[in-house]
Image: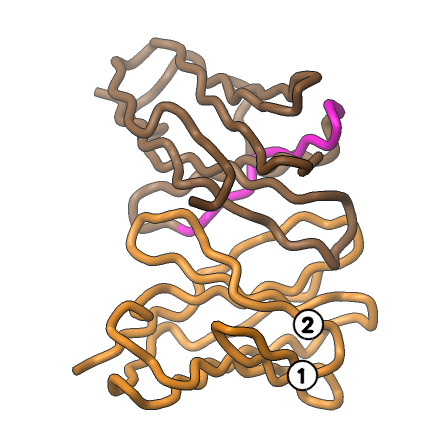
Chain colours: A orange, B brown
Amino acid sequence: DAKTTQPTSMDCAEGRAANLPCNHSTISGNEYVYWYRQIHSQGPQYIIHGLKNNETNEMASLIITEDRKSSTLILPHATLRDTAVYYCIVRGENNDMRFGAGTRLTVKP
Amino acid sequence: DSGVTQTPKHLITATGQRVTLRCSPRSGDLSVYWYQQSLDQGLQFLIHYYNGEERAKGNILERFSAQQFPDLHSELNLSSLELGDSALYFCASSVALGSMYGYTFGSGTRLTVV
């Protein structure tokens, strides 16, 4: 699976959009981009995933660049409860989900 | 409630002992995955079972073993426990093989070895 690079930490003001970047320059054509988050010591929570097109659900939007070498997770209106570690994972066919260090997002009042 | 059930939630045991962690996957899910997360460490993939068969191994120690039963629940057995085995152990499930299917995680078992 392609490796991902994420900033170690980010801050965001409550009520503003949180934009979390992820670089995956070696991604292959059949590899999906997944985003999970982990709040404190809870189990990781699925947020969104995509292959080529941008995706949106009730939690977030995923913007994937046309060359697929990077993506951005957007939380449109961050709340204090969105403070968590966010993981960007590139997953190939039949390969297991491997988590990196992620980005620690702190939402501040 | 994610639908993935892990028991027990907390476990305290002594060095040298053996413990069994249990995971019931979400209804209909055939794959079960086990992860270990030590203090301030990332999630380390241990092992994957699909419909009773072992599919992949990650950083799993020889002292650790797992199995998936016909009813699809899974158990992770940890033996000859050491202080360094203290960690959160997460189980996840997915409906099928294939990278288009995401995982659903349980709330974990916190193991403390004293």
Q: Chain of mark 1?
A: A
Dot 1 alpha-carbon crowd within 10 angstroms: few under 14, some 14 to 19, many 20 or more: some
Q: Is residue A13 left or right of residue B29?
A: left
Q: Pinpoint residue A2: horizontal percent, then vertical percent.
A: 69, 65
Outermost residue to the right:
A29
Residue at mark 1 to residue at mark 2: CA–CA distance: 7 Å
Q: Quadrant of residue A78?
A: bottom left
Are callouts 1 and 2 both on one chain? yes
Q: What is the chain identity of the residue bearing mark 2?
A: A
Is residue A105 shown above or below B2? Answer: below
Quarter of the picture containing the N terminus of chain B is top left
Q: Residue type at mark 1?
A: Asn
Q: Quadrant of residue A7?
A: bottom left
Indicate whether B10 appears above or below A83. Answer: above
Residue segment shown in magenta? B42-53
Rendered residue at 71%/66% (across/down): A32
Q: Please provide percent x and percent y for residue B33.
A: 59, 37
Query: Mark 1 touching mark 2, by CB under 8 A?
Result: yes
Query: Mark 2 falls on what kind of element?
Result: strand
Identify residue type, mark 2.
Answer: Gly
Residue A50 shows which numbered tag? 2
